[in-house]
Image (cartoon, helix red, strand yellow):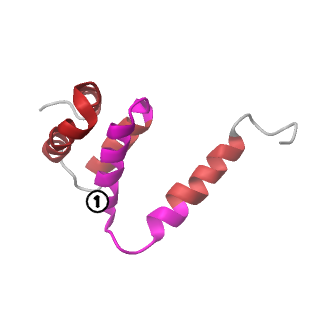
Amino acid sequence: MGKGRALGQHLHEFLSANCFGDTWTRGGLDVPTRELLTFAMLSALGGCESQLKGHIAGNANVGNSRAVLVDVATQLLPWIGYPRTLNALACIREVLPPS
């Protein structure tokens, strides 16, 4: 890593090329489905609430409603447990407050 390069900049470049380049531009699934799957996986991982919130906003931007996200988090409960489900719901509430 060069002297003038910001710490972690190379990771942002890898992230942009891999996650938002190759992965998002491939065929197979439409963007709303990909975004919903990303929400589900980040909810299951736990410890990445910052990214989860970004993808909650992303879901809203591609037409996946707050109600759909709540339904997905609820469906995940038996597999990811109460703490991660409650964290996902808290993130939904923060990013997409009830009307």
* Magenta stretch: includes residue 25: yes
Residue under the point 65% across and 51% down: 13
Q: Establish if 29 lies above or below 80.
A: below
* Magenta stretch: includes residue 64: no
Q: Establish if 3 lies above or below 61.
A: above
Give the residue at the far front of this rendering.
79
Element on which disc 1 rests: helix
Say whether residue 68 is left or right of residue 42: left
Residue under the point 22% across and 52% down: 64
Give the residue at the far bottom of this rendering.
27
Residue occupied by mark 1: 32
Question: In this picture, which residue range is highlighted in magenta?
Answer: 21-50
Quarter occupied by residue 51: top left
Say whether residue 61 is left or right of residue 66: right
**Mainly helix, strand or loop, the magenta region?**
helix
Rendering coords of residue 57 (x, y %): 33, 43
Residue under the point 64% across and 52% down: 14
Quarter occupied by residue 67: top left
Q: Establish if 41 lies above or below 7.
A: below
Rendering coords of residue 99 (x, y %): 11, 32
| Kind of residue sitting beneath label 1 | Pro
Nearer-the-camera pick, 60 or 89: 89
Rendering coords of residue 82 (x, y %): 22, 27
Q: Establish if 31 lies above or below 15.
A: below
Residue under the point 14% across and 31% down: 98
Rendering coords of residue 97 (x, y %): 20, 30
Q: Is residue 85 visible?
A: no
Quarter occupied by residue 21: bottom right
Give the residue at the far right of this rendering.
3
Q: How many marks?
A: 1
